Amino acid sequence: MTPSKIIAAVDIGTSKVISVVAEVSPKQSIALLGRGEASSRGIKKGDIIDFRGACEATHSALNMSEKSAGTSIESVYLSISGRHVEGFFQIGATAINTPNALVSENDIARVVENAKSKALPEGRIYMHHIKNGFSLDGKFLDNPLNHQGQKLEVAYWHLHGDTRRITETMSVINRYGLPVDEIIAAGIASAQVAASDEDKKLGCVVLDIGGGATNYVVYRQGVLARAGVIAIGGDHLTNDLSSGLRVNIAQAEALKKTHGKAVLEDGDKTEQRWLYGELIAGNAAIGNRPIKLSAFAQILQPRLEELFDILRDELGDLYDPIQLKAGIILTGGTSKLTGIVELAKRRLSLDAKLASPIAWVTDTGLRGPEYSTVLGLLYSALTIPSRASAPQGKTTLMEKISKLFSLS
């Protein structure tokens, strides 16, 4: 039996870096041991723009999580996000030529290889091949082996990213002296724990609104059908407030957290808040001024509506309320914004809800929506075989990347 392993789930976000250490047992259990967080440096919209700054922030979070856990990390499961992550749909097909027309293992291997055969442009590398299911003569099947038919097809959603950017993100971890066992798209990681099995069967869209970008994942009939990234996140909302209220970024971020609203509520047109808090006799801050509550929704709502409209366009034919009965599930730090669920329902004409806290997470400090990605990474350590432990003779993603680039 494979022994337990101490791993860290690491999410290098635009706003902060999170590292959560856990012991993953071969008996399919996760024991949370410690965590560390640091304000991000050198990250913009999910991309590394200052490698040294990104290393300093990430290494601080890793060091903090090791101290908190009281043990050393053995390896890392790492999330990948950013505008460079893209996807496409492809169907592979093959004819069944056996005398009895029964689908064989060779037929299945051939059609899968056909669906994965598309070469990517130079500088791109596959991250995930997401199988959407088989069909035999137009009939959907989970497993077509030994079924009789003439034409076998398999559909895949392929997610790929920029090789250089993925390499740089992995190198941030390597510089701490740790190997990366697995890279997982941030949206796929968070969706695993944000949506219940029932949500996935009914069909849903998990929308993880982070600081620099929004990751989305679509489930239909229990199958992960689509994943992608939209280049709008919480930082865009902060920038909009900074411009609209004529305050600096730090002030705008603080105001967003305390007074931000996605929709206008009764009384917002008459109520107001002071920029630097309520006036206190003899302690009036220079430049302090009242701001109507209505201003927050008037500034933030258009940007969120833009996000939801882009999501609708990206889903295309998958935007089908009949196939998405569980609706929209919101997670990520920005999902805490007042009124965002109501706006999602209104704009997308679907049910919407916030992701529920994860049952197996007892640490109250980790039950917020901003931790869905790292917790999903830990869950992946149970459900996804590590590419770092692939059978001999098979080139892993990590090996491919290391051959392409060496960052010294």
Image (tube, helix red, strand yellow):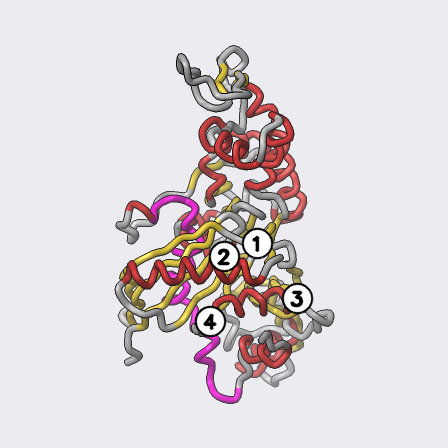
Q: How far apart are marks 2 and 3 (CA)?
A: 33 Å
Work out whether 196 lies above or below 3. Answer: above
Q: Which of pointers 4 and 3 lies earlier in the amino acid sequence?
A: 3
Residue that lies at the very extreme toward the right in this rendered image: 121
Asked whether residue 227 appears in the rendered view, the answer is: no
Task: Name which residue lies at 30% across and 58% down.
Answer: 34
The residue identified by callout 1 is 43
Q: Which of 350 and 217 is in front in this view?
A: 217
Q: Which of pointers 4 and 1 lies earlier in the amino acid sequence?
A: 1
Which numbered circle lies on residue 180? 4
Q: Which of pointers 2 and 1 lies earlier in the amino acid sequence?
A: 2
Q: In which quarter of the image is the N terminus?
A: bottom left
Image position, residue 380 (x, y; %): 41, 63
The residue identified by callout 2 is 12
Q: Which amino acid does label 1 sit on?
A: Ile
Q: Are marks 2 and 3 in contact (CB under 8 Å)?
A: no
Image position, residue 294 (x, y; %): 55, 19
**Which circle, 4 or 3, is nearer the viewer?**
4
Q: Which amino acid does label 2 sit on?
A: Ile
Residue 49's image quarter? bottom right
Secondary structure at badge 2 equals: strand
